[in-house]
Image (cartoon, rainbow, N blue to C red):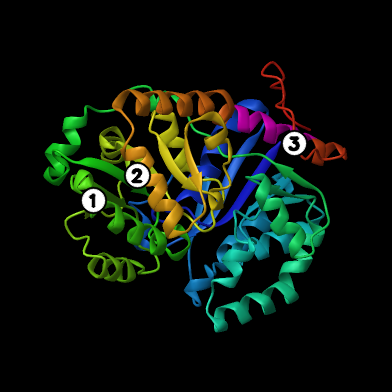
């Protein structure tokens, strides 16, 4: 069976969505599926792609570029439609996704949609009045029909389902979380490698924020919380590392918050890091923090848990298992609770932090690998193509059942 994944972009700088989509695609190819990827690109993205190769089809955008418009992508999809059994549409608001849904309806090809958090009420409300109005008009004219004709919506976290229902979608939903490749986190670089590249890390307790710099990530609450913490005499050595891309130029606001809260000696900006550099920072980190107001299902969080890092997250991260398993603390995305959570972690002994980190690693390796996620998604694909009821919580297809889905 050929599944065509359609999304707006494939560049690393866009964060988790393209990486998680490709991770799922790579894993599911071993379960009777042929996967292709269809997205737009820019000349500046050519050295920053999640993947390339014959299964990856990329198209230059034309005006309006912000909508990721690429008519050539549509033409080629139509030309290849006889070989496509199922569309997996990643996201909602861009030209490629809307076009794929229309092509699917035109040629009677089933499709499912993974909104990836964009239908969450917080994400929609946070827009400016103009952008909010545009979203509502788009949703009324095109979005509703996209959802109505989808065979199901794929949520990466159970909390996301509530957002689907709040916007009026009452069709089938399935929940398949993101995953990681365990072998990528079995052996991290020596901690000294990061210190050699970033000397400011030496003799510091490091809190790692490894995510895009954007409004929903909660730095508006986390930085003031950190400022209150480092005023204490026992926390003068704490350093927050902000490692991530700046797609929305939100770094201007973050820098202003750092200055306002007198945190210049306690914050290090590294920009986006990948591959070995990312592994170096994860290895050197003492604590991982993700204070998001709203999150899909963070790959970065999974990667740090798999690396044995104790974590501080918020309820907006949609991962209550962290607190239940003892892998870290989950608090509201507010200054006071974040401050308290930071102090609790920083006051723990090295032995207790190591134990907490080990619980997080076990949680991920037992439940959140790409192999498990892919076998669950294979179950969903089979149900769609065979006309069966789509399960909310799909059972992973047996590892022995790797025959092509027809």
Mark 3 to mark 2: distance in Å? 37 Å
Task: Determine the main secondary structure of the stretch shown in magenta.
Answer: helix
Q: Residue 163 occupies which quadrant of the picture?
A: bottom right
Q: Nearer the viewer, mark 3 or mark 2?
A: 2
The residue at which mark 3 appears reads as: 393
For mark 3, give the secondary structure.
loop
Mark 1 packing: few (<14 Cα in 10 Å), some, or many (20+)? few
Q: Earlier in the sequence, mark 3 or mark 2?
A: 2
Residue assigned mark 1: 232
Task: Where is residue 319? Give x, y as percent.
Answer: 57, 42
Q: Position of residue 245 (x, y in %)?
A: 35, 57
Q: Residue at x 42, y 59 (%)?
A: 335
As drawn, the label of residue 343 is: 2
The residue most toward the top is 400
* Label 2: which secondary element: helix
Identify which residue, 130 or 405, lies in the foreground. Answer: 130
Residue 373 magenta-drawn?
A: yes
Picture residue at 63% right of the left edge, 75% below the top: 135
Is 180 placed left or right of 147 in the picture? Answer: left
Q: How far is mark 1 from mark 2, CA to CA?
A: 10 Å
Density class for disc 2 (Cα within 10 Å; few <14, some 14-19, many ≥20) is some
Q: Residue at x 41, y 61 (%)?
A: 221
Tell me if residue 90 comes above or below residue 284 in the rendering.
below
In primary-sequence order, the first of circles 1 and 3 is 1
Q: On the rendered structure, is 158 left or right of 237?
A: right
Residue 233: where, in percent of width, then height? 19, 48
Point out the image quarter for the C terminus: top right
Which residues, given as a range, are shown in magenta?
372-382
Q: Mark 1 falls on what kind of element?
A: loop
Q: Quadrant of residue 7?
A: bottom right
Q: How many marks?
A: 3
């Amino acid at each position: 069976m050929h599944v065509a994944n359609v999304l707006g972009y494939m560049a690393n700088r866009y964060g988790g969505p393209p990486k998680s989509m490709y991770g799922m695609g790579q894993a599911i190819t071993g379960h009777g599926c042929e996967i292709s990827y269809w997205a737009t690109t820019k000349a500046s993205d050519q050295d920053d792609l999640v993947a390339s190769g014959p299964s990856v089809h990329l198209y230059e955008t034309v005006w309006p570029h912000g909508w990721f418009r690429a008519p050539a992508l549509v033409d080629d999809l139509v030309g290849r439609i006889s070989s496509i059994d199922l569309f997996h549409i990643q996201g909602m608001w861009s030209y490629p996704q809307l076009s794929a849904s229309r092509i699917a309806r035109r040629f009677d090809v089933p499709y499912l949609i993974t909104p990836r958090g964009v239908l969450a009420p917080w994400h929609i409300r946070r827009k400016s009045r103009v952008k909010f109005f545009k979203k509502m008009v788009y949703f009324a004219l095109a979005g509703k029909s996209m959802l109505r004709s989808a065979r199901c919506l794929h949520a990466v976290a159970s909390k996301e389902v509530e957002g689907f229902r709040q916007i009026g979608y009452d069709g089938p939903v399935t929940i398949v979380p993101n995953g990681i490749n365990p072998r990528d986190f079995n052996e991290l670089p020596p901690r000294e490698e990061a210190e050699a590249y970033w000397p400011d890390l030496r003799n510091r307790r490091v809190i790692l924020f490894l995510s895009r710099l954007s409004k929903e990530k909660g730095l508006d609450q986390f930085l003031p919380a950190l400022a209150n913490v480092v005023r204490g005499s026992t926390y003068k050595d704490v350093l927050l590392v902000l490692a991530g891309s700046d797609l929305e130029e939100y770094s201007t606001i973050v820098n202003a918050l750092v200055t306002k809260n007198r945190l210049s000696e306690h914050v290090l900006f590294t920009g986006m890091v990948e591959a070995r550099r990312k592994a170096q920072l994860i290895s050197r980190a003492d604590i991982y923090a993700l204070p998001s107001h709203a999150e899909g299902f963070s790959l970065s969080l999974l990667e740090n848990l798999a690396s044995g890092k104790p974590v501080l997250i918020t309820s907006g991260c949609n991962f209550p298992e962290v607190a239940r398993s003892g892998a870290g603390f989950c608090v509201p995305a507010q200054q006071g609770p974040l401050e308290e959570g930071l102090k609790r972690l920083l006051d723990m002994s090295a032995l207790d932090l190591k134990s907490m980190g080990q619980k997080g690693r076990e949680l991920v390796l037992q439940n959140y690998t790409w192999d498990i996620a892919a076998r669950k998604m294979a179950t969903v694909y089979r149900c769609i193509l065979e006309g069966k009821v789509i399960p909310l919580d799909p059972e992973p297809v047996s590892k022995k059942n790797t025959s092509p889905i027809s």
